[in-house]
Every structure is written in C-alpha cells, then in structure tokens.
Amino acid sequence: MTATNGNGTQPKSIRAPNPPLEDSVFKMFRMDGKTVIITGGSGGIGYEIARGLAEAGANIAIWYNSSKQASKLAATIAKDFNVKTAVYQVPVENHDAVESAVEKVIQDFGRLDVMIANAGIPTKAGGLDDKIEDWNRVRAIDFDGAYYCARAAGQVFRKQGYGNCIFTASMSGHAANVPQEQACYNACKAGVIHLTKSLAVEWAKWGGRVNCVSPGYIDTAISADCTFEMKEEWFSLTPLKRDADPRELKAIYLYLASDASTYTTGSDMVVDGGYTCR
C-alpha cells in the first residue's frame, strides 16, 4: 500500500539519491585520476598518507613549510607509483597563502578532490607556563590553519558539488596526556574534532564530506626528542604497549579519501593503540 498525504497524493520524499558505487570493494578504494592535497606532506604521517593514496592511483600535491626533502620525497612517490606529484611551500597559518596555493594546485592538476589538513606542531609547555607567542603559533597552525585549508578547499568543493576534507586531529583531543603538559595542543585538537562534525553537517547539503583521524603516539621526528622515561610512561598507558609506525595510518586515510566511505561523514577515527579506551 502506497502512503499518501492529506489530499490523496503521494508525498515527495526528501531522500537523497545513493551515489554510483563499484561492486568490488577493491575498486571502491581506487583513487585513479583524483587530486589530493596533503599539508605537512613531507613529514612522517603526511608522507605515508601520500604514499598510500598514490599507490591507489591519486595524484598528490604535497604542501610543506620548511622541509628540504619535499621535492625528493615527491619525486620518489611519482617514480614508485607512476602518478603526478608536485610540491608547494605554504604557511597554513596564512589564509591568503592557503587560498592562493589551492588555486595553484587546481591550475597545475586540473582538479581538486580531497584536502587532507594534516600539518601541525606540538606544544612545549603547559597552559600556565606556555609563552603567549608560542600559544598563538601552535593555535595558528594546528587550528586556524586546519580551518583555512578546509575553507579554501570547501569553496571549490561547493561550486563543483562534491569534495572531501580530512583533518588530522589527535587522541589528545579526547584526553589530557601525561606526563607532558600540552594544554594548547590538546585544546586545538579537540577543536578540530568538533570543527569536523560542524562542517560535516554544513557540507552535507551540497554533497561534501568531512572526517578526521585521531592518531595516538606515532614514531615520527616530532617525538624523537622525547626522553626514554616519557616514552615508557606513554607505553605503560597504551594497551598495545607501543607507539605506531606511521604506515599503520595509511589505510584509514585511504578509506576516508576514497569511495569506500561515501556514507561516512562527521566521524573521528581514533587510531591510538587503545590509549583512550581506558
């Protein structure tokens, strides 16, 4: 029996159409011909994300701040996976620079499909001991910069009626880590998580998606100068009793960037070895 409204006609549904999908799960993960920006793309996590998406066929625009290895790393990705790559030096805390770089990527690649706002720096002191200038710099890069990247890409995505933004948040947006004190970093990453949810709701009406990944302790250069004792305390609080190889994050970013996740938006994917489960 067909439902009708008060005047006897069939009501109009607000239901959106399903996207066209491959039947093969492996094909759903393919990124052939798509263009992806990865900020902080020459660092440990960012570089492995770039490699993971390039292996799936994506063309990669690596944004970096001061790395001397960015061009070499991009060339390695291009050679290993036969995709187009390019590098751009972009201070993500500068809104005008971010907008200009997005326009340049579209000129160079002809399109933009995914923005991965991954760039970030750590806090070196607690909330009362942090210098105001250090607080402002961490906030400018970790929170404002993430928003600027999403905003610049989102303007493009809204015009074309599709697009995908992925933030790198942190388990520190869920928990106050010990023994290090890092109130600014924690607060910024918590803000990124809620920014993800807010933008996901706003973008859904025109076909955009927004998600974030919250990594735990990862074996990268950022944590290289931490003491043995500090790391031992981290491991003691992590159920898996270790930090992660950055390659262990590639698959979750590929899932979120690809058509394997077309019904996933507003989600925060926690990959922390169980740290926040306690």
Image (spheres, grey):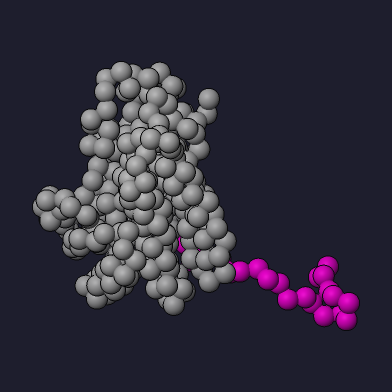
Q: Nearer the viewer, residue 250 or 180?
A: 180
Q: Is residue 77 visible?
A: no
* Residue at 47% from the left image edge and 41% from the top image edge: 173
Residue 32 left/right relative to 278? left
Q: Is residue 43 above or below residue 97?
A: above
**Quarter-wise, where is residue 234 in the image?**
top left
- Residue 81, position as x, y percentages in the image: 19, 54
Q: Main secondary structure of the magenta part?
A: loop
* Residue at 27% from the left image edge and 20% from the top image edge: 228
Residue 207 left/right relative to 181? right
Q: Is residue 190 above or below residue 157?
A: above
- Residue 227, position as x, y percentages in the image: 26, 23
Give the total number of marks visible in the rendering: 0
- Residue 44, position as x, y percentages in the image: 24, 42
Question: Quadrant of the image for the N terminus?
Answer: bottom right
- Magenta-drawn stretch contains 6: yes
Q: Nearer the viewer, residue 49 or 188?
A: 188
- Residue 80, position as x, y percentages in the image: 15, 51
- Magenta-drawn stretch contains 213: no
* Residue at 37% from the left image edge and 62% from the top image edge: 149
* Residue at 52% from the left image edge and 61% from the top image edge: 199
Q: Is residue 105 visible?
A: yes
First to last magenta residue range: 1-26
**Quarter-wise, where is residue 6 in the image?**
bottom right
Residue 204 left/right relative to 41? right
Q: Is residue 229 above or below residue 1?
A: above
